[in-house]
Image (cartoon, rainbow, N blue to C red):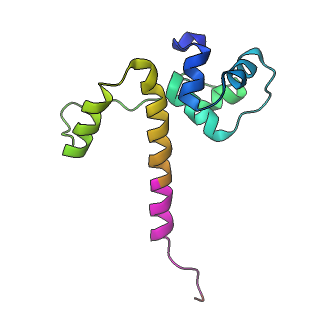
Amino acid sequence: MEGAGLKPQGLARATHRTSGAVTQWLNGSTKTLKADTASMLEAATGYRAGWIVTGRGSKAAVTPRFNPTQSLSAEAALIASEFDKVSADRRFALLASLTQLIAAAQLETAQKTKPPPSGS
């Protein structure tokens, strides 16, 4: 994780976990990670959650490339503008939180659009 340029305190902030928990991850005394923790670590470090958990496969996460020819909505532009004002060490935590909120919203949308069970 040090290769990602984050110190244990930065990882703790980015994952909303204690510095003690981070120390246990780094020294190997923690043998498993929850999926949400691995996901937040991926967002914070750029290392794939699968690699973080298993140590296998590609280390680097695939990040979508920004296409500057695509226009942003007014809302997205505002979020980007505000994001740029946040200090670099807090951006990781903010990005991890946004990722969780977006995933929850997508799940909620999928559940609302799911057809009712047959026989209802």
Residue at 65% across, 26% down: 52
x and y, in percent, of residue 24 in the image:
75, 21
The answer to which of 21 and 43 lies nearer the viewer is 21
In the rendered image, residue 15, in percent from the top left (x then y), is placed at 58, 31
Is 18 magenta? The answer is no
> What is the total number of numbered labels drawn onto the structure image?
0
Viewer-side residue, 43 vs 17:
17
- Which region of the structure is painted magenta? 105-118
Q: Residue at x 59, y 11 (%)?
A: 2
Q: Residue at x 65, y 40 (%)?
A: 35
Does residue 5 appear anywhere in the picture? Answer: yes
Q: Quadrant of the C terminus?
A: bottom right
Magenta segment includes 115: yes
Q: Is residue 59 left or right of residue 62?
A: right
Q: Considering only vertical position in the picture, is 77 above or below 108?
A: above
Can you tell which quarter of the image residue 91 is in?
A: top left
Q: Quadrant of residue 34?
A: top right
Main secondary structure of the magenta stretch: helix
Vertical placement of 24 versus 112: above or below?
above
Q: Can you see residue 66?
A: no
- Position in image of residue 97 (x %, y %): 48, 38
The answer to whether residue 107 is above or below residue 65 is below
For this view, does 30 lie left or right of residue 116? Answer: right
Q: Is residue 76 left or right of residue 95?
A: left
Whole-percent x and y of residue 68? 21, 30
